Image (cartoon, coloured by chain):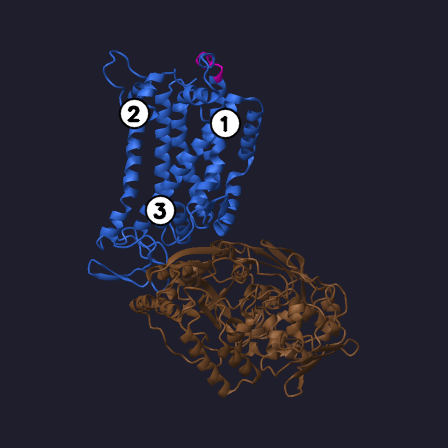
């Protein structure tokens, strides 16, 4: 069991009100969310990385500002033949031998701050900011899809047990036992060419929704399985029996009684899942099965930079460091949230650790 | 020591057999030829960046495929084992001598050399040629337009039954007589292409890439795993039969070869530097080009000029590219100078169909780079459909060329989607008319033989538009041009014809079915174990497997 049921607190603010302090006035009573908030604030490391994460978000959201006012170029605009005036000297963005210019910092008024990305002469800084948007967007959206699907599946399996559980749990087992990255590449490559049609829903081949779709499918078991376990345990609790005795229907029990008790687990998993999904996206894009050119993501940028690793190592290192910082901050914030929300946590999140290792090895 | 040994060897050779010397002369190339220093035997470990389009002599129409199969399937005629202009000379292959041309240039008579055998031991018969040409049509090969001039071939291409009456053979005498509907100035060149290299008559009429049929060359393909690689061994019947029947054809130095597809050209370069592989078929990637050239030029690296055109095609059958103004706008917008850099200087910018070095080439400049003019033209044309898909393959730097092109199109107002297709099946995908959204994209063309017809006929003539394995990606079908192409094709190439081809070049570019951007120089990069000096780079078949030998 995660936290004691506090339906009133949830009714007041719902899970969204996770961080603000509980409303004052009820003398002496502190809600579990408030306590969790206090505990999280005391965790300096987690707070520091939460701030870092927000800074990264601000960085990527500022992409159009930087592109329009400083770099004066778009992320996919090539400048192969252009010349750059740096401190009175004239440099070529791409040399006739095809070597892109290195970081100029503010030498050219912010143009090519981090240099050009390839022989196409695109502004690395602008691509980094827009690429970060893509990477974070894919991470967050696929995280949302995964979490919602996993919660629904976990609730159904854990609550109904029996054959419903058997089907869902075994399907998850099968998904779990697939070599995720290989399968993701195969699916990503084939969908990137042909696009996807499910009933009325059509996704174009080069769409960003292809990697989102692929990633969402494969990460469901990593959340659904632990949630199912927790639902199984919660289902035996007195408050559930009480609700049933009062005549509550299955949906009411699942979503009204059990779900609020899963809130802390879901929040923690959501944060960690975003990090995993970003790594997954980077791996897929690096291998050409994720974000399709000419759009950038941090994974595709590493892939382009790899070609010039010997002469311009920064091109691969910078997006790599961005991924590292984002994933690290999400992981530390996630761990901090877990400690804060559930100091007696029994959920050790082995699943997550296992997955990170697996992906890390293949990248 | 080594040099002295070589001299003695050469003198000895000359003394023993003038015939062998002649063969050496044939095999030797402008870059030094048989000056030697090599040893016989060994297995060549080589790498390609992609698997050829087909591992089937009747179907393959790419440099990769022809390089891979050039020494496995020998046509009736073939190209001299030499470089440059000399390597464009057509010489007898399986045929005893060059064809006798009679009947006003319409009948070609050839005789098979006696005693030829396929690598499975089956004797080669004159009638196999008929089967092979029929097979070419039955599998809808991209090379079939070269042979529709044979009497009855056009009908056979449609019905696929009833035989081709224009080919008459006599197995006993080894005689093959081909009658054409009209004279064709390039027909000997075309008989030297691999499309009609005989295969046994029982070869199934479908793609044999996974188990290539027996051939007649010094090597045979023993194993083929599409997408991954293939292996060669010496053809046992080469030494026993064929080499005696055609002594001037080189037998090769290595005992076999193993080809591995490695999709990352960076890895290929590293592996060759470390000696893990002996040769890479595809050019050194643009990112490593300068470095490799500086380090290995002369010893392991050599630039190879080619007669080629790199271009973007525009599908002229549907909006927006059915409007000549739109196509001209694209030509104004594409800047060959930018693409020269994207190819690290391995491309020289041109904006016409015929490349330098091709008879009939005359430089002209119709579309000096001018983006504003392009935008104006688009505005004037006001196309009904501005949503286009841009196609390119994944091999660097073609993928970047495609990205550049997409950016250019976006700049002049199109809404673009970029599709990058794996290089293994890029041309199969864009050559299939049922692929959706074939609007515009990248392509290249290397001459099959030094005749301007080889650019206009397969790539821009309406007759060459095929449902699958199409090569006329622009689906360009201009009656006046079709007529001129087929008329000029009947004549032997002379100054007058060259002048006409040069006018044709300019006229076609005014209609702008393509936006050409350059002519390519390629390269040969081998490990330190391989004797680079003797590797022959032929303009049609590229590196000959028989010319590879290991250093002592």
Magenta residues, start to end:
A235-241
Picture layout, residue A200 above or below residue A340: below
Q: Residue B421 carries which label?
A: none
> Disc 3 on helix, strand or loop?
helix
The Cα–Cα distance between marks 3 and 1, rounded to whole angstroms, is 32 Å
Q: Residue A19 carries which label?
A: 2
Q: Position of residue A93 (x, y in %)?
A: 30, 60
**Residue B101 vs residue A103, the one in the foreground:** B101
Colour chain B is painted in: brown
Mark 2 or mark 1, earlier in chain: 2
Q: Where is residue A246 in the image (x, y as percent from the top left)?
A: 45, 12
> Disc 1 on helix, strand or loop?
helix
Q: Are marks 2 and 1 in contact (CB under 8 Å)?
A: no
Mark 2 or mark 3, earlier in chain: 2
Colour chain A is painted in: blue
Residue located beneath label 3 in the image: A131
């Amino acid at each position: 069991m995660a936290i004691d049921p506090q339906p009133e607190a949830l009714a007041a603010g719902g899970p969204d009100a996770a961080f603000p302090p509980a409303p004052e006035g009820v003398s002496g009573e502190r809600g579990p969310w408030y306590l969790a908030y206090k505990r999280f604030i005391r965790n300096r490391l987690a707070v520091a990385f939460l701030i870092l994460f927000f800074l990264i978000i601000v960085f990527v959201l500022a992409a159009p500002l930087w592109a329009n006012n400083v770099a004066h170029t778009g992320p996919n605009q090539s400048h192969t033949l252009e010349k750059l005036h740096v401190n009175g000297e004239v440099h070529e963005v791409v040399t006739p031998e095809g070597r892109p210019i290195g970081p100029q910092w503010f030498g050219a008024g912010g143009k090519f701050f981090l240099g050009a990305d390839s022989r196409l002469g695109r502004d690395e800084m602008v691509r980094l900011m827009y690429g970060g948007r893509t990477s974070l967007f894919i991470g967050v959206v696929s995280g949302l899809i995964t979490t919602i699907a996993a919660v629904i599946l976990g609730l159904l399996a854990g609550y109904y047990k029996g054959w419903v559980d058997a089907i869902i749990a075994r399907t998850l087992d099968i998904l779990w036992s697939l070599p995720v990255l290989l399968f993701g590449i195969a699916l990503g490559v084939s969908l990137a060419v042909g696009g996807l049609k499910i009933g009325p829903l059509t996704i174009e081949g080069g769409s960003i929704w292809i990697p989102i779709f692929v990633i969402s499918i494969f990460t469901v078991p990593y959340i659904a399985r632990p949630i199912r376990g927790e639902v199984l345990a919660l289902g035996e609790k007195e408050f559930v029996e009480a609700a049933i005795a009062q005549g509550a229907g299955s949906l009411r029990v699942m979503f009204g009684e059990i779900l609020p008790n899963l809130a802390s687990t879901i929040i923690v998993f959501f944060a960690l899942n975003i990090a995993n999904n970003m790594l997954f996206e980077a791996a897929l894009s690096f291998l050409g099965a994720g974000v399709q050119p000419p759009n950038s993501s941090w994974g595709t940028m590493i892939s382009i930079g790899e070609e010039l690793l010997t002469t311009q190592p920064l091109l691969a290192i910078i997006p790599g460091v961005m991924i590292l910082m984002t994933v690290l901050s999400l992981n530390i914030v996630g761990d901090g949230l877990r400690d804060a929300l559930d100091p007696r946590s029994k959920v050790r999140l082995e699943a997550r650790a296992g997955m990170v290792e697996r992906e890390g090895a293949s990248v | 020591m080594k040099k002295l040994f070589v001299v003695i060897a050469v003198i000895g050779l000359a003394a023993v057999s003038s015939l062998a010397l002649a063969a050496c002369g044939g095999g030797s190339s402008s870059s030094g030829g048989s000056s030697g220093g090599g040893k016989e035997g060994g297995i060549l470990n080589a790498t390609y960046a992609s698997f050829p389009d087909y591992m089937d002599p009747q179907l393959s129409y790419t440099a990769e495929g022809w390089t891979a199969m050039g020494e496995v399937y020998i046509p009736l005629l073939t190209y001299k084992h030499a470089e440059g202009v000399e390597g464009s000379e057509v010489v007898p292959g399986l045929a005893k001598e060059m064809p006798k041309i009679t009947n006003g240039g319409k009948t070609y008579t050839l005789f098979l050399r006696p005693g030829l055998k396929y690598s499975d031991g089956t004797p080669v018969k004159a009638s196999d040629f008929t089967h092979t040409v029929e097979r070419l049509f039955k599998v809808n090969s991209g090379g079939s337009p070269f042979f529709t001039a044979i009497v009855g071939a056009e009908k056979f291409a449609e019905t696929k039954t009833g035989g081709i009456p224009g080919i008459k053979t006599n197995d006993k005498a080894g005689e093959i007589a081909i009658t054409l509907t009209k004279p064709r100035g390039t027909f000997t060149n075309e008989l030297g292409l691999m499309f009609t290299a005989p295969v046994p008559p029982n070869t199934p009429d479908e793609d044999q890439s996974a188990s290539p049929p027996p051939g007649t060359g010094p090597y045979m393909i023993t194993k083929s795993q599409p997408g991954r690689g293939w292996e060669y061994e010496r053809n046992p019947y080469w030494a026993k039969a064929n080499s005696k029947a055609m002594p001037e054809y080189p037998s090769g130095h290595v005992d076999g070869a193993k080809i591995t597809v490695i999709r990352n050209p960076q890895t290929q370069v590293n592996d060759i530097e470390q000696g893990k592989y002996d040769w890479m078929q595809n050019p050194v990637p643009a990112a490593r080009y300068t470095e490799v050239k500086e380090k290995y030029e002369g010893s392991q690296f050599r630039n190879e000029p080619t007669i080629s055109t790199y271009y973007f095609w525009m599908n002229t059958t549907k909006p927006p590219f059915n409007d000549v103004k739109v196509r001209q706008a694209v030509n104004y917008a594409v800047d060959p100078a930018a693409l020269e850099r994207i190819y690290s200087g391995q491309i020289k910018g041109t904006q016409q169909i015929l490349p330098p070095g091709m008879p009939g080439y005359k430089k002209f400049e119709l579309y000096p780079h001018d983006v504003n003019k392009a935008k104006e033209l688009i505005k004037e044309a006001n196309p009904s459909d501005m949503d286009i898909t841009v196609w390119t393959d994944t091999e660097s730097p073609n993928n970047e060329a495609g990205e550049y092109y997409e950016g250019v199109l976006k700049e002049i107002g199109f809404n673009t989607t970029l599709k990058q297709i794996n290089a293994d099946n890029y041309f199969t995908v864009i050559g299939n008319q049922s692929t959706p959204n074939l609007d515009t994209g990248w392509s290249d063309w290397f001459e099959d033989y030094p005749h301007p017809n080889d650019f206009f006929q397969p790539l821009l003539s309406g007759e060459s538009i095929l449902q699958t394995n199409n090569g006329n990606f622009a689906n360009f079908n201009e009656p006046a041009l079709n007529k001129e192409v087929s008329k000029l094709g009947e004549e032997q190439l002379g100054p007058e014809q060259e002048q006409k081809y040069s006018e044709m070049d300019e006229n076609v570019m005014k209609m702008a079915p393509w936006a050409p951007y350059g002519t390519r120089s390629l390269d040969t990069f081998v490990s330190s174990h391989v004797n680079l000096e003797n590797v022959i780079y032929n303009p049609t078949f590229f590196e000959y497997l028989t010319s590879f030998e290991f250093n002592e």
